[in-house]
Image (cartoon, rainbow, N blue to C red):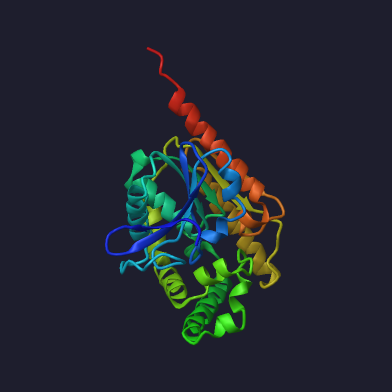
Amino acid sequence: MPGQLVDVGNYKMHIYCAGQGTPAVILDSGLGDIFASWREVQPKIAKFTRVCSYDRAGLGYSDPSGRSRTSKDIAEELHMLLHKASIPTPIVLVGHSAGGHNVRVYASLYPDEVAGMVLVDSSHPDQDRLLPAALKTRDARMLREVELEEISMRFGIPRLCRFCDRFDYCHNDGVDRAAECNVHTVHEGIAEWEAFPESAAQAAASGSLRDMPLIVLSHDPEKTDPDLPPDVDKLLRGAFENMQQELAQLSSKGVRIIAKDSGHYIQLERPEVVVEAVGSVVAQVRQRSTTVPSR
C-alpha cells in the first residue's frame, strides 16, 4: 500500500501524498473509484507541488466510517483526514465525475481552506433531471449488475475470474487488485450511488465559488457512445455541453477546457491536460498569495 493509514477517530483512512510545496492539491475520485484512478497524473503534479490522493471511507484501503455516503459526509470526513494528516491550507481541490459534487460541498463548508478548484468531467446537480431517460435506464441496469457483483465478491469469484482487471485505472497488479477487488469497496460504491441524488442536491445548494480560480475540464463532445442509439446520444451530448458550461460559471474566474479525443476518464486518457490545468490553478493561487494590495 502506497501512502499511510491515518486515524480519524474510530476508523482509519488511506492517503497517499507526494511532492513538496504549497498549495497542496487534493484529488477526489469518481463514484466508487479508489486513489489509483489518479496514478497517471499524481507523479507529474508532484514535480511542482505537494499532491495527495486518498480513498474515501469504505473504499480501497480505508475503513468504513458508518456514516451515509452523501457529499456532505464525505467532505466532513476528508476535512478530518487532512487535519489529522497535517496537510496545510488553503488547498486546491480536484474532483472527477461525482467527486465534483464532493469538492464543491467541501468548498462551501470550509471556504477559507479552499483556494482553487479543477473539475474533471464533473457531474452536474441537475443531470438526473436533464439527461435522456434511456441513459437512466442503462444506469439502473448497471447498478443491478454491481449489486450482483457484491454478492459474488463474497465468494472470491471476481478475483478468480480476473473480473476486477476491467477497471479503467487497474494495471492488473496486486496493489490495485487488493484495494479495489473486495466486498467493502463494492458495498460502499453502491452506497455512494444510492446517495447520489442527495449529494447532487447538496452540491446545488453549495452556491457560487465567487472569484476562485476554477478550470472545468470536459471530455470531447465529438466522441459518441456506441452503447446508445444515435438520437439518444445526440441529446446526451447536447445536455452535457450545457451543463459543463454552467459549471464553468460557478466562478467569475471560471474557464472551460475540452480534452480532445478523451472520454470520461480524462486523467487516464489525456493526463497531460489535467496536469496542465492543475498547474495553472496552482500558479494563480500562488500569485494571489504573493500579491500585496496597494495602500
Residue at the spot 57% in from the left edge and 52% down from the top edge: 242
Q: Position of residue 13 (x, y in %)?
A: 38, 60
Q: Relative to 151, does residue 41 appear above or below in the rendering?
A: above
Is residue 132 something one can see in this rendering?
no
Picture mark count: 0
Residue 191 in the image: x percent, y percent?
Answer: 40, 72
Residue at screen point 50% across, 68% down: 179
Q: Quadrant of the C terminus?
A: top left
Q: Choose between 74 and 241: the one closer to the eye.
A: 74
Instruction: Judge left or right: residue 174 versus residue 207.
Output: right
Asked whether residue 139 is in view, the answer is yes
Residue in the foreground of this view, choosing between 84 and 79 = 84
Give the residue at the far top of this rendering.
295
Looking at the picture, tell me which residue is in the foreground, 145 or 223.
145
Task: Estimate the x, y position of residue 75 in percent, counting from the top left.
Answer: 36, 54
Task: Name above or below for residue 56 compared with residue 161.
Answer: above
Q: Position of residue 180 (x, y in %)?
A: 52, 70
Between 130 and 102, the one lying in front of the other is 102
Residue at figure coordinates x 39%, y 64% from the top left: 57
Question: Looking at the picture, does residue 129 appear above or below residue 250?
Answer: below
